[in-house]
């Protein structure tokens, strides 16, 4: 459900107004998370490791309210009780992809079953950006995570649709590698600094790692 925030009584009023006039009020960060447990569980169950970490990311986002503030088409700050996941899925060897919207379910088995069915039902001949175009400028109740499982990276900067950044947080999960005897994976994101501070970013990575373990 969408809620319109009363700026005058909002706890982040000063933070938001401070960054509002910045040419670029977004920040980008990349950090690694340990994911050995999730890879082991997925392999043992014959499941998708990709869907395991998508769930962990989306669960963290839905547990940290600051990741669910948005700026709507009328310039108002709004808040969503829950958000879903947009993610591009590779559908051809030439790199062609199709973006799908995966609904949030707190129960992992339900999330996994629904997500797998949506991905299996992709029509590769349709517009790959159909999910992103649906709703237009009102598409706000999502986060987007792109996966590059064959590419390890140490930093990444996401595209920005507006001067205030994108309509929602943009993320990328890279190739998992062994470091110090454990499997780690880089996760990059670009977010609006008026909504999210270092404390919330630290909490996000901590939660994702906890869920993956």
Image (cartoon, rainbow, N blue to C red):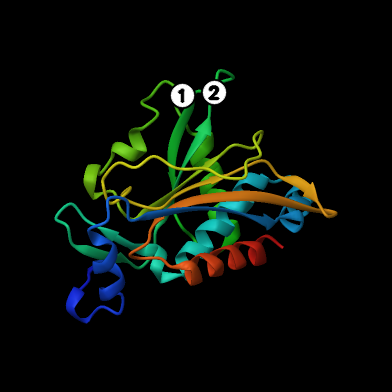
Residue at left offset 62%, top offset 45%: 154
Q: Earlier in the sequence, mark 1 or mark 2?
A: 2
User: Residue at the location (28% across, 48% down)?
Assistant: 139
Pick out the residue farthest to the right: 181
Q: Where does residue 161 sit, x and y in percent of width and height?
A: 30, 41
Q: Residue 152, position in %: x, y?
A: 66, 39
Quick one: SS at disc 2? loop
Residue designated by label 1: 124
Can residue 106 be seen at all in this image of the molecule?
no
Res 199 seen here: yes
Q: In screen coordinates, is 147 left or right of 168?
A: right
What's the residue at 53%, 26% (across, down)? 91
The answer for how far apart the CA atoms under marks 1 and 2 are is: 12 Å
Residue 204: quadrant of the picture = bottom right
Mark 2 neighbour class, 10 Å CA radius: few under 14, some 14 to 19, many 20 or more: few
Q: Nearer the viewer, mark 1 or mark 2?
A: 2
At label 1, counting other C-alpha atoms closer than 10 Å, the crowd grade (few under 14, some 14-19, many 20 or more) is: some
For the image shown, how many numbered marks are present on the structure? 2
Residue with the mark numbered 2? 95
With 46 as the anchor, is 3 left or right in this view?
Answer: left
- Residue 84 image offset from top left, x and y in percent: 42, 54
Compared to residue 210, the image places residue 75 above or below, namely: above
* Relative vertical location of residue 64 with respect to residue 165 in this rendering, above or below: below
- Residue 130 screen position, x and y as percent: 34, 33
Determine contact: label 1, label 2, CB under 8 Å: no
Q: Quadrant of the N terminus?
A: bottom left
């Amino acid at each position: 459900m969408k809620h319109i925030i009363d700026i005058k009584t909002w706890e982040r009023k000063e933070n938001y107004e401070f960054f509002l006039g910045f040419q670029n009020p977004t920040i980008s960060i990349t950090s690694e998370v340990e994911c050995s447990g999730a890879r082991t569980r997925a392999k043992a169950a014959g499941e998708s490791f990709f869907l395991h970490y998508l769930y962990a990311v989306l669960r963290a986002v839905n547990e940290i309210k600051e990741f669910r503030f948005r700026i709507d088409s009328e310039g108002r700050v709004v808040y969503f009780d829950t958000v879903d996941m947009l993610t591009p899925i590779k559908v051809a060897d030439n790199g062609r992809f199709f973006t799908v919207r995966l609904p949030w379910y707190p129960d992992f088995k339900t999330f996994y079953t629904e997500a797998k069915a949506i991905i299996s039902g992709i029509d590769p001949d349709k517009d790959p950006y159909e999910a992103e175009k649906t709703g237009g400028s009102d598409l706000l109740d999502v986060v987007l995570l792109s996966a590059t499982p064959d590419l390890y990276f140490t930093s990444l900067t996401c595209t920005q649709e507006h001067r205030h950044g994108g309509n929602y947080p943009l993320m990328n999960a890279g190739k998992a590698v062994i470091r110090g005897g454990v499997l780690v994976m880089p996760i990059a994101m670009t977010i609006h600094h008026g909504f999210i501070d270092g404390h919330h970013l630290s909490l996000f990575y901590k939660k994702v790692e906890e869920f993956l373990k």
